[in-house]
Image: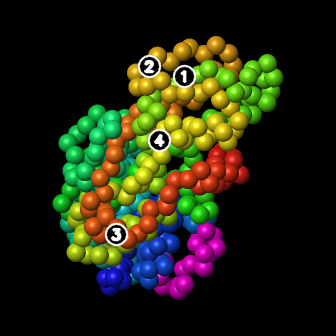
Amino acid sequence: MSDTMNVLLTGGTGFLGEYLLVELLEGGHSVWAHYRSESRKLDTIRFLSSLGLPRSAESLKWFKGEILEADEQWEQWCQEYKGIDEVDTLLHSAASTRLHMDESGEPLKTNLGSTTALNKLMERKPLNVHIISTAYVCGLIQGEVVTEVNHPRGDFVNVYEESKWEAEQIWMGKATILRPSVIIGHSETGRCTSFGGYYILFQAAHLLDRLMADSKNLDRLNLDIDIPANPNGVTNVIPVDYVARAAVRIMEKPQYHNNIYHLTHSNPPTHEWTLSHVCNRFNVGGLRFTGVGASFVQPRNRIERMVWRQMQTILLHFASNPLFDRANTDSVIGDLTVPPITSGYLDKIIDYGIEKEWGL
């Protein structure tokens, strides 16, 4: 392992950010963690405390500010937060995960704006830079192998992917680019604080189960609903604890910095496997994949209308089916086991989502 790092972490109160904090602190590194919300900071402190972290008062310090103005606020931060100027590493995890542009300009505002501001700051305060991107900067891909390279602009499924691609172009050659796939709950506890994306299918099935309880005249095992997506496509999901551990392990090896790494699953579940498990879990049937581009039958009743509305969002997550090469990642941390996506694990993250009422 390299010498300990003194890390400036953005997004420290986010879902992934909390686990990055765990790995950094357990690795003996010092962290200046950025936050914007006092309540989220307190939630993160409680979470760390439940794990016995931090182990020393000096290993974790907090600072509050606007990352979009990092280059302008740096001097003020140095005056207000004594010792922050001693950081030697930037881990940029803060991001907006909105899939569509909103009236305020998100996710471009945060994902591209923060990159621009931090890149300007690096001209005054050089740091070893590591950024959390997404493996889906490759754009819309059907079943092809995607390598760990700088991709040309593609046809993106959503604005989030596009904003991450644009941010990568600014950092390319000047930062270690860490590309996780779809991040989901902890491999052992199922813990999660964000229930979008992959979780939407689980939420829809849970809602469908409850609606069916009030619809005695419908046969819940023969719903006869077609889903226009490829059953053999895969959703590359990865537990949050693996992503955090892999990212920090790579950061700890300076000789491998300034490269691109896919923090992805080597054996992701197919859409068919996931749907089959979800249907069995909630005792519903008659949902089937009919292939990309197949027609979507208009809803015939209240249940189908609900499914149809949910599918408008779910289909976005079935649309892109790349296979991710991990040559760079495996050459550096190939000994780090990727937690398998099993039926037991899927039940664990579903149970956690239900317990937390899907974050509503």
59 or 114, which lies in front?
Answer: 59
Question: On the image, numbered disc 4 is attached to which residue?
Answer: 270
Crowding at mark 4 (Cα within 10 Å: few <14, some 14-19, many 20+): some
Q: Is residue 316 visible?
A: no
Three-letter amino acid code of the residue under disc 2: Ala
Residue 235: x %, y % from top left? 45, 43
Q: Residues within 10 Å of mark 2 (few under 14, many from 20)?
A: few
3D distance between C-alphas at marks 3 and 1: 41 Å
The mark that comes first in sequence, 2 or 3, is: 2
In the picture of the structure, the residue carrying the numbered disc 2 is 294
Which residue is pictured at 59% across the width and 55% down the height?
A: 345
Q: Was residue 58 drawn as part of the magenta stretch in this picture?
A: yes
Which corner quadrant holds the N terminus?
bottom left
Tell me the distance, in whole angstroms, between the alpha carbons under discs 3 and 4.
25 Å
Which residue bears the numbered disc 3? 333
**Distance of label 2 from label 3 (alpha carbons):** 41 Å
Colouring mode (rainbow / by chain / secondary structure / one colour) = rainbow
The C terminus is located in which quarter?
Answer: top right
Label 4 and label 2: CA atoms lie apart by 18 Å
The one nearer the camera, 270 or 308, is: 270
Crowd band around label 3 with a 10 angstrom C-alpha radius: few (<14), some (14–19), many (20+)? some
Span of residues in magenta: 45-60
In the structure shown, which secondary structural element does the residue marked by tag 3 occupy? helix
Secondary structure at badge 2 equals loop
Please say if the residues under marks 2 and 1 sit with CB atoms less than 8 Å apart.
Answer: yes
